[in-house]
Image (spheres, rainbow, N blue to C red):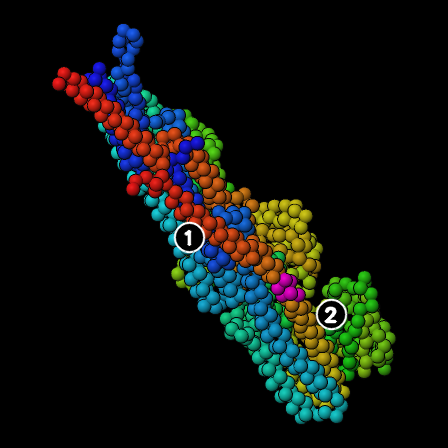
Amino acid sequence: MRISTSTFFDSAAARLGDLQSGLATAQQQISTGRRMLTPADDPVAAARVLEVTQSQSLNTQFTSNRSNARDSLSMEENTLQSVTGLLQDVKTLVVNAGNGVVDDTQRKYLATELTSRFNELLNYANAKDSVGNYMFAGFQVGSQPFVETATGASYLGDQGQRLLQVAPARQMALNDAGDTVFEANKTGNGTFVTAAVAGNTGAGIVSTGSVVNTALLTGDNYSVTFNVAGGVTTYDVTDTTTSTTVSSGNAYTSGQSISFDGLQFDVSGVPANGDQFTVAPSGSQSIFTTLKNLIGVLNSPGTGSTANANLTNGLNTANNNVDNALDNILQTRASIGARLKELDSLDNAGADRDQQYSQTLSTLQDLDYTKAISQLTQQQTILTASQQTFVKITGLSLFNYIGG
Amino acid sequence: MAANILSVGESALAAAQVGLLTTGHNIANANTPGYSRQVVIQGSAGAQDSGFGFVGKGTSVVTVQRVYSDYLASQVTNAQTSQNELNTYYTNIQQINNLFADATSGLSPTLQNFFSSLQGAASDPASSAARQTLLSSSQTMVSQFQSMDSQLREIRDGVNSEINGSITTINGYATQIAQLNDAIEKAQGGDSSKPANDLLDQRDNIVSELSKEIKVNVVKQNDSYNVFIGNGQPLVVANNSFKLVATTSPTDLSRIEVGYQGNNGTVTLAESGLTGGKLGGLFDFRANSLEPAQNALGRVAIALGTTFNAQHELGQDQNGNLGGAFFNVATPVVNASTANTGSGVMSAAISDVNALTTSDYQVQFDGSNYTVTRLSDGAVSTSATLPLTVDGVDFDIASGSVNAGDMFLVRPTANGAANISVAITDPKKVALAAPIRSAATGTNAGSATISAGSIDSTYTAATITPAVTLTYSALTGEFTGFPATLPVTVTDTAGNVSVYPAGSPVAYSSGATINFGGVNVIVSGTPHDGDTFTVGPNTGGTGDNRNALLLGALQAANTMDGSTSNFQSAYAQLINVVGNKTRELQVTSSAQSKLLDDATQAQQSESGVNLDEEAANLIRYQQAYQAAGKVMQTADKLFDVLLSLGVQ
């Protein structure tokens, strides 16, 4: 078969060109460390790399969010820890005040101490986090949530919970609203609250009471009125919501339980004629109101059995309410603790995920150096051989032998 | 007798001389493109009847002929056309491929950064630094969209200028072929026994070069080549050549197409008819890779802008106002054909980004029906009246009237990436909060809670002005207190929907979504008789990030392609398509190159000059020349013998 001279040179040059471009590509792969230089090298992997990169970026963002969440929750936990200590001190103070040895003057000292504790608590409730936002204000983080009033404090924030996306399908609350933490404390025993009416002239002391049969509870308000006639003390129980009499003429023994409609409590001491004690469903009381009430109780002077009974009743109520407030705070702290723990486990999962994504990316786009370098060497060898044979073969021509 | 020997010798010498000249010509033209080697055809000069038999009179040169095979040459031309078409497409699509090559500098990192900064703003919505970072990274992302789009536009401009160049080249070749037709006819004078070899070679070479630009059909007519292109338009007929001109598309002034200047004026040639060669490759590239790539990029921008805006408008900014548009989103490009006779102006608006495709649409009116054709696959929708919605785009006539035969080109996503911009410069105007908030009144005896609430697009501030207080009655199990003029829709946890007319009380179902006036809230738990819940404006809620969370969720939400892709995966799809096509072209163009190589080799082995062969011919004709010279010398000696007769 004939081969024309130009074919010979053209095809040899084309082959050399191909080999050189293959060598250049291999060299570029090695210097960038990437198997794919353009999407055309592996279109499916190119698209997959983009998707995995987005997932990894989301994962990193969640890690950063979790760190922010941890900061917020830790600050809240610190503040509530101080609040817990404060409330425990208040409880000690209440017990001290109930000590029979303490007199009016000393109670006034306790009231003063309590006032400064009140201010301290207000300060904690108005605490700011590391960027200057009020922690317990709900959404209104720019304005102070609690403002002191004559009867306690009023809450100017809202019930908003600030959420943050800490995992693909998990939004975590960064805060707890001030009213839930400080104001939603149940009065009484959580179901009903007993109280001595303010104008009582006797010395009856009413206990907190408990529920004996939830099925019989009505949720109504009751009034227990004492009648003292001829040295015999009896009491009547009236349902003031329905204006019906539940029972009347019950004989009274100090400390014996009074029970009706599924609930029971007791009165001890010596009530006077006409003394009333009320039972109402539990409501919510702000800790600030509790403290103000307690300060009021400690500041009211009095000697005598009635004054002492009032003091005891007041201290009992305060003690009860402070307990409930403390429970509420501890419950919130437990919730914060649970969230922090969840953040830890999400962090572990997130770190694992990140490693997995990195590995996938590496498999998709990183160069296998061993293979690449051996291919490069092979291509070098082929190119060198081609170049040398080209020169040799083109040197063969009949014209070398003609003439002379 | 002696005289005859001399003339025989002379004829041999002359023949050898022609042979040497022709061999020398071949050697000189060994590297001339398109040259076919020439051989001398010698014939006997006949014989003379000398009584006892025929005595030969020597040799004569019949003709000098080129070694040329029509079949092999046409093989090469065909392979050339296909190869150049694929090569042009491949070279051009590599430009797009390289645009997407570096993953660290493409669109994807800026998209990720944008959503990261959104999460940063969600962590601390009151911080103006976080808001400013969000605005800056949105600006960076938008710039990246614009920059990629402008690079695609540059490629488009490059295609236009290459088409221009190709047309000029084709016209030049056509003129040359016509001139050569003329010259060959004059030179050969209708007698094909004396071929004008070099002129013929030249003409064949030009036809071959022309086939690199466009597919041609050559029909021989006597000594002329008639060249036809496309669907049978004559480019060269005998001595006349016709011109191609660059025209602009009637529906897109930035698009160059090919027009044919015939005897009746300029006619635009359909691209589907102009296949093969560089021109065919350019058209194929532009229609099937470049414009879809630009549309796909635009689609991502439009989907991102539209869905983000929709959610942003449901939020509240730091000034207490409902959020406005965050991005300025591009509108579809609508072009009326310059051939339209009616005054109709077509409008197109995108109503559903989820249904958007990457195709362009053609709207035609035939007098009674409007036909919307999706140009990527030819799918047709017909309607007697407009508005008509196809693939998420609403087509309508904005003004004027449309006549039969009028045509419009609608490109919904073409400008998507070029015209996207950030509409907000003031960090306070970023709407990260929700406009409403709710509360369970502190004195409530029950344990029911109310969700923070969200709004939908029917919401107006009037719904919660004044704030709505819902009161629960244990007796009836119902809520009262809804705004007097708004009906209430309740969807319970099982999915059952109940609608209450305005002003009537609403039965309570724990966990059910309550919707009124664009506001959605959920009350769950056990309320006590008389418990109240308020829904009111979110004044002062600077720490609220509810809308920021909803905006952040858009990153991974499947909002495109019939709810199967998110923004990143739609972009990844684009890269996949480009990469695949480039890969495919790499393989097919190198396969076609191999075919071209084989065809060329076959043709060259027939017509190409081999220097060694010519060297052998040199020696042959030289020896023939020497032998012929010897014959003449012998004739001379014989004449001397004659002359010496009669001398004493």
- Magenta span includes B300: no
Quadrant location of the N terminus of chain B?
Answer: top left
Q: Chain of mark 2?
A: A
Identity of the residue drawn at 43% across and 44% down? A15
Residue holding disc 2? A190
Left or right position of B426 against B454? left
Task: Please give the range of residues in magenta.
Answer: A345-352
Q: Position of residue B493 (x, y in %)?
A: 67, 50
Residue B139, compared with residue B226, is above or below; it is: below
Alpha-carbon span between mark 1 and mark 2: 61 Å
Q: Position of residue A364 (x, y in %)?
A: 56, 53
Identity of the residue drawn at 30% across and 40% down? A403
Tag 2's secondary structure?
loop
Mark 2 is surrounded, within 10 Å at the Cα level, by few (under 14), some (14 to 19) or many (20 or more) other residues, namely: some
Kind of residue at disc 2: Gly
Residue holding disc 1? B145
